[in-house]
Image (spheres, rainbow, N blue to C red):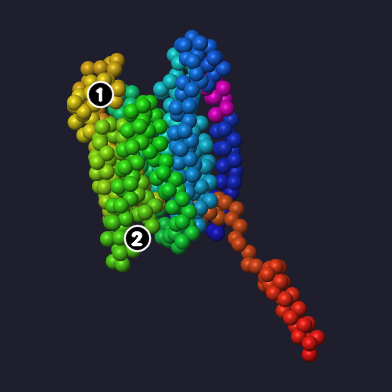
Amino acid sequence: MDYFSRQKNTNIRLTLPVVCFVWQIAMIILFGVFIRYDEESDTHWVETKAHENITSDIENDFYFRYPSFQDVHVMIFVGFGFLMTFLKRYSFGAVGFNFLIASFGLQWALLMQGWFHSLDPHTGKIYIGVESLINADFCVAGCLIAYGAVLGKVSPVQLLVMTLFGITLFAVEEYIILNLLHARDAGGSMVIHTFGGYYGLAITWVLYRPNLHQSKRMQGSVYHSDAFAMIGTLFLWMFWPSFNSAITDHGDGQHRAAINTYLCLASTVLTTVAISSLSQKTGKLDMVHIQNSTLAGGVALGTAAEFMISPYGALIVGFFCGIISTMGYIFISPFLEKTLKIQDTCGIHNLHAMPGVIGGIVGAITAAAASESVYGKQGLINTFDFTGDFKDRSVLTQGGYQAAGMCVSIVFGVVGGAIVGSILKLPIWGDPADENCFDDEVYWEVREPESIPPILEYNNHMIHKQQDLSESNFSVEHCES
């Protein structure tokens, strides 16, 4: 390792602990000032029940939301983490840094989303419950998506800085899209995936490494690393119906979102397998496609999940997403790297950015085509929340605002990512040298397996048993002779 690399490692040994301690102390102080339990998690819940004539604790939002929260939480820490373990020498960084930035991000997200969405003007406090935890995980998901673009090429301190700004940008664009434009985006096709995808792509574009070929030997996968990554895929695939339905309205909206996502994902798998096989002269499958493109349907149906898209409509969305996402890995990713200098490690353009845009388009069309004959009068009001200041909004107008929301997420992702990328480009963050990218050994203590001394093979009890048996037979034969 050269002198410059050693200096970077010295920087990270000093910087990472300081950053972690300072930011966690800051979180403790800010939580002490602003964060409080909401009425359903406070000890005054007993009084609230009596005042509102609630007869059972089952009416507490915890019992409605916590199962979905569990599923989303597993997706964030296990699904995203293991999906990125495909690199042969970067499994620790994939799972470990995912763990780090998610743990920091969810704390900062509770504050940022609280300041924008639920700050009590009278007390100046943010009141949190189980739904707040789900929304914080959603917020973190956008940053984990962006992490996929820079996987193996940045330091943990850069990741924390990226998460700090990413959560902040997310909270602002989420407020604009959901509150000001009043767009619907239950599963986050626009707010989470489109923003996170273009945020990460813009950052990796600014951080372009012309000499990244020096670590080419580390960029591939091996048999066991692909198997580990498939664990992440399966966790994400199984729990995506919970992700898209977690914060929808109780009842038919949540039920419909889970059904639509379930069907869309199943359809995506078949077309992904078909295109992957067709793309190879031998007809064999590419594990990259199976790990990633099979999830694209869940991304694309996020916005329209709670709409009356119909079961066959969900299958159609999944059908086309599998094709488009797989073709993206085959044709678009090489084009982005060669022509636009975008080094997208995980291919987030094909799994998140592009399917997220498709989801925004599907949501806009489905909203504009909504009718009272399909939804019912009250159904339209409930699904699109046509109440208060928005009670006179038409479905066509709603479709227009849905499209506007998608544009906002793209702008925030691209512009915000370019600015944050410029900050991360400063030579103070301890990022790895080109020849050391995609290697855990730069930031992790890696213990290589030691060769087993030949003498240890005699510790096998079966070998001892066989030897004893042979000796016994020899003794018997000797006596007989």
* SS class, disc 1: helix
Kindly identify the residue that appears in the image at 53 percent across and 41 percent down. 100
In the image, residue 150 above or below residue 133: below
Q: Residue furthest right?
A: 479
Tags 1 and 2 touching, CB below 8 Å: no
Q: Mark 2: which amino acid? A: Leu
Q: Is residue 479 visible?
A: yes
Residue for badge 1: 380
In the image, residue 161 above or below residue 51: below
CA separation, marks 1 and 2? Answer: 44 Å
User: Is the magenta region chiefly helix, strand or loop?
Assistant: helix
Residue 190 coordinates in the image, percent (x, y):
32, 35
Kindly identify the residue that appears in the image at 28 percent across and 56 percent down. 275
Q: Quadrant of the C terminus?
A: bottom right
Of 345 and 480, which appears nearest the observer? 480
Kindly identify the residue that appears in the image at 38 percent across and 43 percent down. 200
Around disc 2, counting alpha carbons within 10 Å, would you say few (fewer than 14), some (14 to 19), or many (20 or more)?
Answer: some
The numbered mark at residue 285 is 2
Residue 154 coordinates in the image, percent (x, y):
47, 48
In the image, residue 425 above or below residue 123: below
Q: Mark 1: which amino acid? A: Leu
Instruction: Compare marks 1 and 2 and give the one earlier in the sequence.
Output: 2
The numbered mark at residue 347 is none
Kindly identify the residue that appears in the image at 29 percent across and 15 percent down. 388
Q: Is residue 175 visible?
A: no
Find the magenta span and give its range. 26-38
Q: Quadrant of the N terminus?
A: bottom right
Displayed quadrant of residue 314 = top left
Residue 30 coordinates in the image, percent (x, y):
54, 24
Of 155 and 142, which appears nearest the observer? 142
